[in-house]
Amino acid sequence: MSAPFYKPRFLKVFTGLVYLYLFIPIAIVVVFSFNSQKSLQVMEGLSFRWYTEFFNDPTLMDSLLTSVQIALLTMVISTIVGTALAIGLVRAHSGTAKGFNILMLVPLITPEIVAGISALLIFSQLGIALSIWTIVIAHITFSISYVTIVVRGRLASIGVEVEEAAQDLGASKWQSVRLVLVPALWPAIVAAGLLVFALSFDDFVLSFFTTGEDAQPLPVRIWSMIRFGVSPTINAVGTLMMVVSISAVALAVLIPRLFGRRESGVKVLTGAEE
Amino acid sequence: MTHKRFWEWFIFPGGIWIALLFAIPLFLVLALSFGHVDDFGRGVYGFSLDNYKDVFDATYVPVLLRSVGYALATVVLCLLIGYPVAYFIARYGGRYRYALLAALVIPFFVNYLVRTYAWVALLADQGLVNNLLVDWGLTESPIQMINTPYAVIGGLVYGYIIFMILPLYGSIERMDPSVIEAGKDLYGSPLQTFIHVTLPATQAGILAGCVLVFLPAVGDFVSAQLLGGPDTYMVGNLIQDQFFAASNWPFGSALTVVMMIFLAVWMVFYLRRASKGEAEVL
């Protein structure tokens, strides 16, 4: 077969259709969030009516603030703990490391509803009232694994030679981690943090099981809105949430690029190991 | 401090966190599943198998089977849709490869509820799709699309297809293209080359993708709740119900344990491969 005929036209068209399938529902949410009327079928005219409604709704604004707080706390704590875990797992060649290497993967492949119920049970067993903190703790549990995988991917490409060189020059082990290893991992750490922010901000199932009466995060609020009938405000909330999490993800992709590694941004997203 | 011990200190905060707040609570679920509800409606631990008898009651078995069926259908559809896409990006994406991948990931950072809700707006009896069909004269009256198994499975495919495409992409990209050329030289037909060379070479990605879609799909309750009705409820909806509306935590725990037993084989299989570095880890 000669080269020009080898180009698979079918694959190209098929892929194009799949992208359409992926993006049409999202485009509809965005477009109808600017509809001046309540209709979800016909665009009557452009307006910011539903955004105004959202920003004037004290409970929704409260939820937005709660979601941001949860995502920030989750990001900071899980990034620190997850990075340490990644370093330990890669550098300590021991049975403990092997065991935790497997344990760390379990939260990622367990259905979220199971994680939600487990969290709910341990909190009620310990007599901890559900609040913003119980949500944060539940979010951190899966986020640690996520950070660990992203950071570990980068760590695998950094040899031990640099740290050894630092130690030859008189640095203690701890100093070689702090002054050599962590700066080298920094792009991956920041990217992992931003991804975890987006995941926590968007999470519904875990939040649903661990939320208290007040301070419900946005996705939990959206859930009750959808169940009590369709409201165009959901389009506006959805669009705004989209802007927040996609900005975080875009930064996560861009930051490793700024540090001069072209592909690692996408590798962060796709979880590919190097 | 020994070398090993120094590095192990880094493991402990995260390792202990996951053990205490993830592994141990899973055993609490198991323990509570043998319990019962007291007079105040609270779950109490016990040693009875009553909840399991209830799970395998004629009311709930169909729901369990349905969940597995829907999840399997989701896996098959994700594979059929995802493989060509992953193949195209990996082999013909060229310089747009990373842009195409990034574009693929974007929808999955849109809130799952909002995405599913968009499908409700599209597929409802008075929704966009039905309006178009009627306007174009393709049908007299609206076709019922929502509250059907198809809508629920469609929602699951839309929700989880990325977990199929990414590992597939990884394994196709790593495959040496020259083996396809060699296959062509030996077998001739593109189909045979695909079946005998490409598929086996990308087996790791296929298996990882199937597991990573199946596991969350079985436990999902959002798709069935928003796009389906009581006839299409999945085990996730039952479990969710027991912890909220019905407030029977021990029975909800038993349902969860039974679901996890269904899933355990897949999970262990995945973890074994992942620990050997064989599976694509997402």
Image: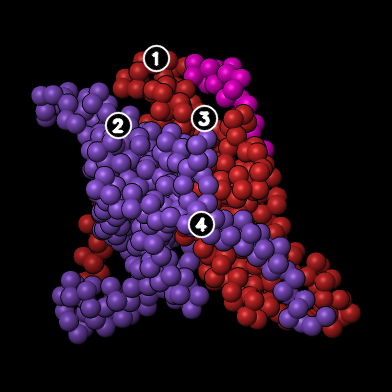
Judge if badges 3 and 2 mark residues of a common chain.
Answer: no
Q: Categorize mark 1 by other alpha carbons within 10 Å: few (<14), some (14-19), many (20+).
A: some
SS at mark 4? helix
C-alpha span from label 1 to label 3: 22 Å
Q: CA distance from mark 2 to mark 4?
A: 43 Å
The CA span between labels 1 and 2 is 17 Å
* The residue positioned farthest toward the right in the image shown: A170
**Quadrant in which residue B82 is drawn:** bottom left
Q: Amino acid at mark 2?
A: Leu
Instruction: Identify the chain drawn in purple.
Output: B
What scheme was used to colour the molecule? by chain
Q: What residue sits right under mark 2 in the picture?
A: B122
Q: Chain of mark 3?
A: A
Which chain, by letter, is red?
Answer: A
Q: Which mark is residue A221?
A: 3
Q: Kindly identify the residue that appears in the image at 61 percent across and 48 percent down.
A: A125
Q: For numbered disc 3, what is the local secondary structure? A: helix
Q: CA distance from mark 3 to mark 2?
A: 22 Å
Q: Chain of mark 1?
A: A
Determine the chain carrying the residue at label 2: B
Q: Quadrant of the N terminus of chain B?
A: bottom right
> Which amino acid, by three-letter code, is at mark 1?
Gln
Q: Which residue is mark 4?
A: B31
